[in-house]
Every structure is written in C-alpha cells, then in structure tokens.
Image (spheres, helix red, strand yellow):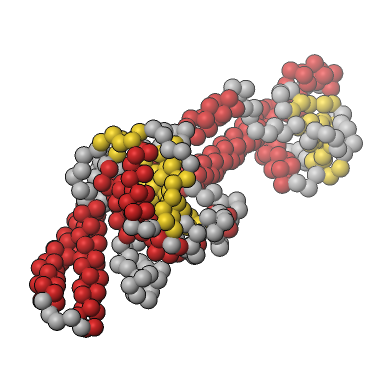
Amino acid sequence: MTVADLPGHRPWWPSTLRARISLILLAGLAIAYGLSFSVLYIERYMSAKAVMLGTLENDVATSIAVLDRLSADERANFVDWLSRGNYNFELGNGLPGVPDTSAHGAEIAAKIEDAVGHRFPIRMEAIPGPISRLQAHLNLSDGSPLTIDVTPKGVMPIAAWLPYVFVVQMLLIILCIWFAVRQATRPLAELAAAADALDPNNKSPALSDRGPSEVAHAARAFNAMRDRIAHYLEERVQILAAISHDLQTPITRMRLRADIADDSPEKTKLLQDLGEIERLVQDGIAYARSAHGNGEKSARIDLASFIESISYDYQDTGKSVEILGLIQGTATTKPHALRRILTNFIDNALKFAGAAEIAVERRNTGQIAITVLDRGPGIPQDQIEAAMQPFFRLEQSRNRNTGGTGLGLAIAQQLAQTLGGSVRLYNRESGGLAAEVVIS
C-alpha cells in the first residue's frame, strides 16, 4: 500500500513533512507578496489619480482664465504652451463623443468646475477608441467653444529592473525555506532512522542530542527509552537463566531417585518427563546465553571440514543429513555459535521432514550463506516472521516427537547477530522449508 492509497489522502497534497512545510511557507509568502503588490498598485494608482486631479484643479483653472482673457486671435498661440502630458486644450468643439456617465468622468468634471468657480458650465463626453479619453466642453465668456482633451493616466510605470529584483527575492526566499525546513525535519529523520535500527541487544551509538532544546529533549528521551528497553530485556533473560539454572538441581535429584527405583512403566514415563524438562531447561539457558553472546572468540575455519563434521555427526546416529555441491574456502567466525545455529536448523528439518540437506554459497559481496533445506510441510507464509519469536511453536501438540520449547530458531537468530550475520526462513518453490544463515 502506498501513501496515495491511504484513506483521506489528497493526491495534490505532498506526502512528506518537508514538502508540506515548504508548500505552506511558500504559499503564505506568495500570498503576502501578492497582497503587498496589490497595496502598492492601489497606492500608486491613487497617487497618480491625486496628481492628475490636483493638476486639473490648479493648472486648468489658471489656463482657462488666461485663455478667457486673451483675444480670439491670440488664443491659438497659447494652446500648446498651456497643454500638459495628460490633457491638452483645443479651440473648437473637439471630437464627437458620447455622454460620459462614469464616476471617474464625473469626478474630473467636478474638479474642473471647482477650478473655474462654476462660471463655465461643463459637458463631459467619452471618446470611443482603444485609449480611454475624456473631453470636457465649455464656452468661454465670449462664447467661443473650448475643449479640454483629458487622457487619464493609470498607475505610474514600474521600473524595468523591479521584476528582476522580485525574482531574486523569490529565489532567496525559496532557498531560506529549504534550509529552514531541512534544519527542522532532519532531527525527525534521524530519530526515525534510530528507531528503525533500534536493537537493544546490540550496543549502538546514542542519538545525538545537539540542536534546539526540543530536539535535544526528544533525543535524550529516546536514548533513555532505549536504555530502559535494554535493561528490561536483560532482566528478563537473567530471570530466565536463573530459573533454568536453579531447576537443574531438583531435576538431578529427581533423576537419581528415579534411577534407584524399581523398574516399572511409571519409572519409564517419569524418566521421559524428566528428560523433556531437562531439554527445556537447557534450551532456556542456551537462549539466555545467546542473548548476550557467549564470549567466544572468532577463529578461521575450513568450511568443507566444518560442514562435513556436522553432517557426519548426524549420519553416525543414523540421521539423513546430506551436503549439496562442493564446498571450498575458509571463513572467520565463531565456530561453536555457528555450529549451534546449524544444528538447530537441522534438528527442525529432521523433526518435520525426516531428512536435511546443507548447501553453502559464497556471494559476490564476500558473504557466505549456509542453508539447511528440507522437504517437509514448510511454514505458512503469514507465520514465518512469528516462527523466529521465542516460545513460538507451529506444532501445538507438545508431543515428544514434534513438540518442543519453541526456542531453537530464536536462539539461532540471536547467535547469528553475535556473528554479525542474519537468519532467514523461506518456503521452497518445490516444497519444504529453507533456513539460511548469512555470515560475513
């Protein structure tokens, strides 16, 4: 199942915390920049409008007064001189237009009328065309028509370099967001990695508590939790070892008393029960020892001789244990621990299949895989992982033939960890089970 398959997941919403925080910050800053730009645009528009209206109110009044006092022949010489960038004077009726009913036109007309003191009635018209133009028509004191052609200016032009500055700012913001989010999420990634690699049986370096106080507190809490888990596991194993060890004395006394008793069916059953209890105690001690290693030193072994000796030991007792293929080379490992792992695998194969085969493979990575194969019923796929847990038994009958303590595979797994290796179970395609131990 992927993140997109989870209920309630939005396809457009990022799945990682880093991407989500980055998107939220970037969207927030983009909205803030958009609002700032809108405010700037409105402010520049209002400034341009105020400047234009102020010019109309001050300069147009003076210009109309000058033209009104001049004779009709002299006015043409002053028209161009009195014109400005956003308006100009024309002697005559101007261009044909349509009555302007816009609020902007009404505001301009009001400004002009205020400027001339309402002495000249003004008619405002809009001139059709691609450019917004307004014309104010009035008659001077002598009845001569005068047209004021107004081209309302929009927002003041933006400097050509401003977009480049905006792009640079956005790039700097994105860089700062990336750095800030990385600093915020990196401790979470380290904590997740430490949690994934948590193994109380292997002493790994403590999680670094450097960084902000919240991160340091979480790291210290995680390290303390790991130490408590290791302590609890160690206590559990010590209790198991102590109980198993203390049970050996009464078991020995019971066996001695049974041995001196008269032969009877009850004596035979009692000795069998004592043997089963003794195997349980020995497995408990072996599991407790394997949890913390047995202190064995590593040594170089010849693989062919080592595997053959294990196989011959079983064959001498009439068990069917065969070696597949040719074994060559040496390995540096803990021989007794590796032997215990393989004997546990072989015992399970003999118990459930009646025969076992041993195969050795040297991989390109330099690792050595030793696999014990059988033709038994295998393990249900959903129970393979559980089969590695202590005291788990696929066979629940507890009979002497197929029952057991459920510690064999758990012991093998812990011993493999002391070798720096791993254990894997899988069902063979042709039927049966394969138990594999990989060592370096």
**Residue 432 visible in this rendered orientation of the protein:** yes
**Which residue sits furthest top?**
77
Which quadrant of the figure has residue 149? top right
Q: Quadrant of residue 5?
A: bottom right
Q: Position of residue 122 (x, y in %)?
A: 78, 40
State the residue at coordinates (51%, 41%).
26
160 relative to 332, above or below: above
Q: Is residue 268 above or below residue 101?
A: below
* Residue at 24% across, 79% down: 269
The answer to which of 396 and 181 lies nearer the viewer is 396
Image coords of residue 434 (percent x, y): 46, 54
Question: Considering depth in this image, is 49 or 357 the residue closer to the camera?
Answer: 357
Asked if residue 100 lies left or right of residue 31, the reply is: right
Instruction: Give left or right: position of 341 versus 181.
Output: left
Q: Is residue 292 left or right of residue 98?
A: left
Q: Quadrant of residue 105?
A: top right
Number of marks drawn: 0
For the question of whether residue 435 can be seen, the reply is no
> Residue 2 placed where, x, y %?
55, 54
Q: Residue at x 26, y 50 (%)?
A: 201
User: In the rendered view of the protein, which quadrant contains the C terminus?
Assistant: top left
Q: Residue furthest right?
A: 96
Q: Measuring from the top left, give residue 200's x and y in whole percent.
A: 26, 51
Between 200 and 332, the one lying in front of the other is 332
Instruction: For the N terminus, give its image quadrant.
Output: bottom right
- Residue at (86%, 42%) from the top-left corner? 98
